Amino acid sequence: MAYSEKVIDHYSNPKNVGTLDKAKTNVGTGLVGAPECGDVMRLQIEVDEESGVISDAKFKTFGCGSAIASSSLATEWLKGKTVDQALAIDNMDIVEELNLPPVKIHCSVLAEDAIKAAINDYRVKNGLPELVAEKKAH
Amino acid sequence: MKLELPIYLDNNATTPMDPRVLEAMLPYFTEKFGNAASRNHSFGWVAEEAVDYAREQIAKLINADPKEIIFTSGATEADNLAIKGVFEMYASKGNHIITCTTEHKAVLDTCKHIEKTGGEVTYLDVKEDGLIDLAELEKAITPKTILIAIMYGNNETGVIQPIREISKIARKHGVLFFSDGTQAVGKIPVDVNADGIDLMAFSGHKMYGPKGVGALYVRRKNPRVKVTSQMDGGGHERGMRSGTLNVPAIVGFGKACELCMNEMESEAKRLSTMRDRLENALMELEETYVNGTREHRLPHTANISFKYVEGEGLMMGFNKNIALSSGSACTSASLEPSYVLKALGLGDDLAHSSLRFGLGRFTTDEQIDFTIKAIKETVLKLREMSPLWEMFKEGVDINAIEWAHH
């Protein structure tokens, strides 16, 4: 199976690999997937408390090239968005942007889950109720 | 010499054909095109003579009699013919077969088929080193047992089963012993008499011969073994496998066996030295594990897990330049990680993190140097990107986390 050029580019030059301080109240962390399934994504957002805009986003991913590319792309998209705008990111946007084949759609679902988990972590830390997301099949 | 890319290190999947094999085959496509079963003219005689010669070359490699070689389309067909053929032929004696969980799918799925048609199959577990437990094997034998099917060398780990001990147990209980020798024949000395094998499957394309040809060795003496044909027709191959013989492929298979026989000793040494060098260099990386015993192993195979990186992601770092295979789910059609590695007791996470190296006749030291460098760099790069590696380094117990399985 050949990878799309965009997947190869994100894999070779991943954007925003790293770790934010998860102890900070304005940092939300989402850790999704499982080692047994072959993918684990950790996605973090740092929110500017005055504007509500995501000022920084970082990821680390254990997984195939498509999983790495999906999370790298997600961090790029997150930066500069408000938290509410970030909630609107749909896994199918990632599929389209990266030209993921059907067998790799679960990588994009995982990235969406990671975004939502990071936002929820941020919300809970800041006294907001947790959002219940619709469950997508992996 | 300049290093040519890509490098092929997937010789357990298939091997390139040796040019000397191709040369031997060529006349049998064109001017010597006869049907080996044509008894009444020279075209047939020429083909038959070529088949007879190849049968001798093949038999010699495994110390068999040429009459004990039944040509098939490959090892999968030979596995099917051995297991189904014995099951049907010896139905009056019993219906129980013993095999093990790390066999090739051609054996396991054939056994599954047998179970659907009224047979009983025991699947022996293997120990952590990949070897079967001989005491377990003996315990599994019942008065209904007709066949023990245990492979010679494993395709994923290279682990070599204790063939002579298995055959002793089989003999003691009057049970036939079939071995899938696909990965072993041509690579290490295999002697059906000294090893006590009654039936053995092997294939041309794993030993620098052509694809689409293989053989089933069927013992003719002590005991005389028979299998029920699974392909009916003109009664070729002593009635055990009908179908016009694939003469060019058989000629190539014969030549391939002859070359393996002549070059095996030096080649096995060369390959195991290179393999060990590759393995030792990669083992310098932290949290790296060799899967299966290093002691009883085919000389050309290594299976290594690089913990905290995923196999497919890892291969993507160099698969433009190096061809090999992984036990990761993402590389298989089933989306399940390697059942062979899981049978060794590896967790799914380590199975996902494995690479299989299959060295071969055309592998060079320069290729191994390049591979060591490329894999080390990619593992280090991906670990920097891996949340699991970070947790491991921080001393977080990854097994204690409640992962959301999807």
Image: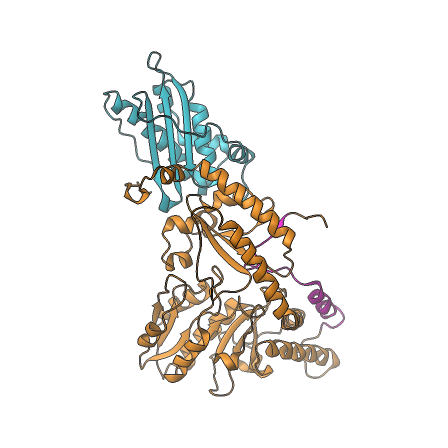
Chain colours: A cyan, B orange
Residue A35 vs A28, above or below: the answer is: below
The residue lying toward the viewer, choosing from B2 and B172, is B2
Front one among A102 and B255? B255
Region rendered in magenta: B6-33
Describe residue B275's horizontal placement relative to residue B133 as left or right. Answer: right
The residue positioned 51% from the left and 57% from the top of the image is B302
Residue at 54 percent of width and 81 percent of height: B239
Looking at the rendered image, the quarter that the C terminus of chain B falls into is top left
The residue most toward the right is B31
Left/right placement of residue A121 relative to residue B175 reads left
Query: Which residue sits at x=41%, y=30%?
Result: A59
Residue B185 sits in which quadrant? bottom right
Residue B61 visible at all: yes
Q: Position of residue B97 (x, y in %)?
A: 37, 74
Q: State the image coordinates of residue A69 (x, y, percent, origin top left).
A: 48, 34
The spot of residue B252 in percent (x, y) is: 66, 69
Residue nearest the observer in this picture, B134 or B215: B134
